[in-house]
Amino acid sequence: MSIATMKSSQRVRIEENGFEETTHIAESVSWDDLERYAASKAGGSSERHQSWRSHQHDSSRKDEESPGDLYELWRQEQNIIAARLDKELKSRWELDELIEEQLSRYQSHYFKTMVSTSLKDVSNLLMPTWIPPHELAAVSWLGDWRPTSILDLVRILAAQNPNFSLSEASERVLSQLTREIRIEEAVIDEEYAEIQATCVLHLPFSPLCNAQSREDALGSVQELFGNINKVISKAQRLRYKVLELVMKKLLNQTDTAEFVVAFAGIQDAIHQFGEQKKLKKQYPTVSFKGSGSSS
């Protein structure tokens, strides 16, 4: 066999073992190169073998534990997980109770008797003296406070709060609910407008009352107050209906809590603003010129 044939045969065997001979090397691969390559292959195989042996050792150690020890370990793990789940459930139950309590407060507020039995107190029906004027203008029906404002708050929270998870299905329900509530709002607006247009006919100085007896005039006024009571009660019930739908049907538990906090915060901010304006009106500030200034 010639030298060239031997070199070609060595090159073929070297390439089969994973070597690539470059064009810059004219000589054949030495035995030292072969030994180093074989050693590197053996080292990787040894590492994989050690890892396999370590895994087998851990498994054998676990197998060495008695069935009683394994059962006790399993039982402890189950108890730990169950305790964590129980704590989570209790916190959710407490949150549900707080939401229900807040909703019941809204119900008692919106369903309370709106009209006094005394005619002299009827002014408190439309303009309660215990509410600051600015607050009354913001949260009353005549101040354009509509139940759809509650639905607008849901949209704002969904757009600005990353933790507020409003699904596509919930968004469709929200849009449908908005359309339905606006129709009911329009009906109430028409009833309000009718009362405002005809209430002057029931006043004592109106020609209609002058032509009636005292008893008939009082009855006419009483009927007017009854109509006002019906419209305001209907508006309050619609507000509560929207709140209940949002808190019980539309939002999940976490989002409902976020909504309740935001809704209460807005109402409190309006109240604080109204109180500040009321105090400034009662106790206006007076600025005095400095003693060194010219008059």
Image (tube, grey):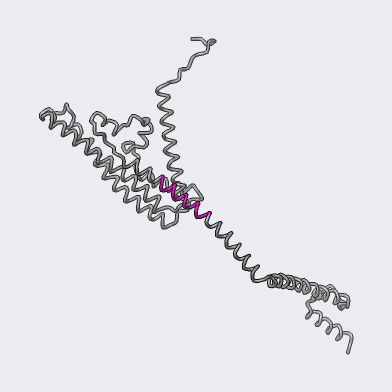
Q: Residue furthest bottom?
A: 1
Q: Quadrant of residue 17?
A: bottom right
Q: Is residue 98 magenta?
A: yes
- Classify 21 as above or below 110: below
Left or right relative to 111: residue 56 = right
Left or right relative to 66: residue 265 = left
Marker count (numbered): 0
- Classify 167 as above or below 10: above
Left or right relative to 270: residue 111 = left
Of 75 and 214, the residue lying toward us: 75
Q: Quadrant of residue 2?
A: bottom right
Where residue 289 appears, as percent x and y from the top left, is 50, 13
Where residue 170 appears, as percent x and y from the top left, is 41, 55
SS majority, magenta: helix
Quarter containing the N terminus: bottom right
Looking at the image, which residue is at 40% across and 53% down?
250
Q: Is residue 74 magenta?
A: no
Q: Quadrant of residue 223?
A: top left
Looking at the image, which residue is at 40% across and 27% down?
278
The magenta span reads: 87-101
- Classify 261 as above or below 34: above
Where residue 156 appears, as percent x and y from the top left, is 44, 46
Of 275 and 6, the residue lying toward us: 275
- Classify 200 as above or below 6: above
Where residue 112 appears, as percent x and y from the top left, is 31, 40
